[in-house]
Amino acid sequence: MKLQEFYDTGRFVQRPSRPGTRTPAHLAQLMRYLSGEANIAQPIRPQGTGTSNTDCNTSVTGTVLRTTRLNRIISIDTYNHTVTAEAGVTLGDLIAALAVKGLELIGNYDQTERTLGGALAAPCIGAGIGHQASFLSSQLISLKVITSRGRMMKISNSQQHLLSAFRMSYGMLGIIYEATLRVQQITTFSASHRSLTVDEFAAVLERLAAGSIGLKFYLLPHKNHVYVDLRRYETTPGNSYRAPWKIKDWGESTVLPHVFKSLSRVLPIPSVRFQIIDKLSAATHGLLTTRLVNSGNNACGRRRRKSPGNLLYSTWCFPAVDFSIVIKAYTRFCQEIFERTGYRCDMPATGFRVGRDRSALLSPSFDETLIALQTISTQSRGWEDFAIDLADFAENWGGIPLFSQSLALRDGYASQIYTSRLEFFRKIRRQMDPENRLLNPYLARNFE
Ligand SMILES: Cc1cc2nc3c(=O)[nH]c(=O)nc-3n(C[C@H](O)[C@H](O)[C@H](O)COP(=O)(O)OP(=O)(O)OC[C@H]3O[C@@H](n4cnc5c(N)ncnc54)[C@H](O)[C@@H]3O)c2cc1C
């Protein structure tokens, strides 16, 4: 008698299983967890590296299925320029393996410890050059997915509607097991830098956002200053070296957060502390970004194993056509909050140009080009209130939320923004997961 038949006799009572995290080591185990045979607590939520800051990747009363052991790179096709890998491989490992074959990802993605699955199932934004290089999921060609009932489903390039639903689906339609992506030959870009006041930046923003240039910027609202990084493919861009990019990334994402965190312990007087913090940020971006890196490629990313930790962030996107006004309003907002509450973020906010992209049903930039603004801090006391105020600010300015990165998202607001696309996604989700096995309370607020 099979185990399930034995349970069905009623002579054996299955104890409800405890919430927890499982890390399947191979495909069969992943399928078993989802099929119901393994009797794991529900709801089930897939998780990659877990760097999203909302509850999209958690399951307090159920099971988190962490994909990090499913990390094989299956094949790299140097002729057709594609790569096939399991969902748990990190972007850093993928970038390194591609580089050996003279290839790179299309688009430039900083957070290289995130997993391929997480980067495809959630918006993975970088300073990409070109129209379809802002989200990694745009490059997706085909998928192998394990459905909410534990069955394998293959989605090919010819099933564009289904692929479009799976891109940025936050693991609600099934768990990505394997993906094939388009890649490109390593191509050197030139990186030029500007140091501008907020007003000067606002004056040129519309022109910058309208092109296909890669745009990333660092905003210091309390210094009224912006450091701009512009990337374009040139006919003769010169050589690119990995070391300067590694130093820049290390300075920005590891040294600064640690120093700022320590400063808040040893320097209790905020006015002195923040003066030093702003000077250090300005020096780091002035020196590392402006002087050190003048050319690069998408293979230059640092191979980080762990998230820098301690970093609190919330990301909202805004229509690029409005951003010259929004950035001034955001600067004032940060200054007013500081005056009123004494709270301010110590890290510069980071922004990216996100080209219009219709390849995903839930693409934030489905209708127009956006600017993604990521507010970052190491200061935890007062952060939650700040994130709520920031969500209010974003709503007032027509901000587009990311379900994996926008904190304090108000119920109902996402429906106003994603409108009929959200409704259509809900229908597909109900078909793919009629028993809501993959839906946790956070996602249910918008997707049930
Ligand atoms: C310091 C810091 C800086 C960041 N900078 C950026 C940035 O510049 N640009 C940017 O876009 N993001 C940034 N992020 C956010 C984050 O890195 C991205 O959202 C990332 O894509 C998440 O990848 P992950 O592997 O951590 O996925 P997770 O956070 O674990 O999961 C993300 C979502 O995908 C789902 N998921 C995960 N794996 C699978 C799978 N195999 N199948 C189906 N669904 C799955 C999860 O359920 C969840 O809904 C930053 C985060 C931090 C902490």
Image (spheres, rainbow, N blue to C red):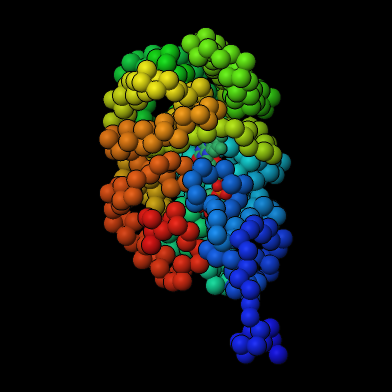
Q: Is residue 185 visible?
A: no
Label tally: 0
Indicate which quadrant contains ligand 1.
Answer: top right
Query: Which percent across, then down, holds residue 171?
Result: 51, 58
Quadrant of res 28: bottom right
Residue 332, image x and y in percent? 33, 20
Residue 21 appears in which quarter of the rendering? bottom right
- Relative to 434, is 405 above or below? above
Q: Is residue 347 visible?
A: yes
Location of residue 63 with respect to 417 vertically, above or below: below
| Left or right for 48, reference 432 | right
The quadrant holding residue 161 is bottom left
The C terminus, quarter of image: bottom left
Residue drawn at point x = 41 percent, y = 58 percent: 444
Residue 326 as seen in the image, left or right of residue 102: left
Q: Position of residue 5 (x, y in %)?
A: 64, 87
Q: Which residue sits at x=46%, y=67%?
A: 436
Which residue is pictured at 32% across the width and 32% down the height?
393
Q: Nearer the viewer, residue 235 or 414?
A: 414
Residue 360 spot, x, y in % from top left: 41, 53
**Residue at the image point whose x is 28% and y is 31% from the top:** 322
Most foreground residue, 121 or 275: 275
Front in this rendered view, residue 268 or 301: 268
Quadrant where the N terminus is found in the figure: bottom right
- Left or right placement of residue 214 versus residue 243 in this view: left
